[in-house]
Amino acid sequence: MTSLASRACAPCKGEEGKLSPAEIKAHLVALPAWQHGGDRITRRFTFKNFVQALAFVNQLGEVAEEQGHHPDLTLGWGYVGVTLTTHDCGGLSLNDMIMAAKIDALV
């Protein structure tokens, strides 16, 4: 099986790209630090200070632009919160799992 982090995000239209609950569960095995709730997955990253957290956001932003898939972020002193969902399909898509793996590879 190909690593999620080595894959690329692809455009999805409508609900055709939406993952089933079983597919979500299977992908999350490879992403144990991510929390699943409803139509999204989330993770909180911690850092020693604001500068390191901001640098992480900038790295993450470059990956998001490259992949054309953009998470919702919260930035504060020593932390970054990341939320992934695919609005076009109304839930989680393979793109969310790919982005989560690519984000994990940054740390």
Image (cartoon, rainbow, N blue to C red):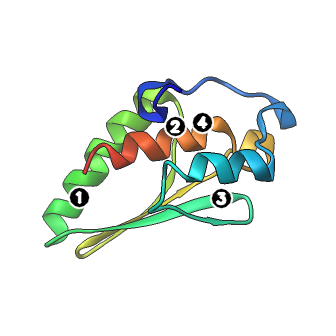
At 23% from the left edge and 58% from the top edge, which residue is drawn?
Answer: 54
Q: In which quarter of the image is residue 12?
A: top right
At 48% from the left edge and 40% from the top edge, which residue is drawn?
Answer: 99
Q: Mark 2 points at which residue?
A: 98
Q: Report how far apart the C-alphas of labels 1 and 3 lie in the structure.
A: 23 Å
Q: Report how far apart the C-alphas of labels 2 and 4 lie in the structure.
A: 5 Å
**Residue 54 badge:** 1
**Residue 28 badge:** none
Q: Do labels 1 and 3 touch, CB within 8 Å?
A: no
Label 4 or label 3, whichever comes before in sequence order: 3
Label 4 or label 1, whichever comes before in sequence order: 1
Q: Do labels 2 and 4 touch, CB within 8 Å?
A: yes
* Local SS, label 3: strand
At 37% from the left edge and 35% from the top edge, which residue is drawn?
Answer: 63
Q: Name the residue under label 3.
A: 40
Mark whose residue sits in front, 4 or 1: 4
* Local SS, label 4: helix
Query: Disc 2 marks which amino acid?
Result: Ile
Q: Position of residue 29 (x, y in %)?
A: 55, 52
Query: Disc 1 marks which amino acid?
Result: Leu
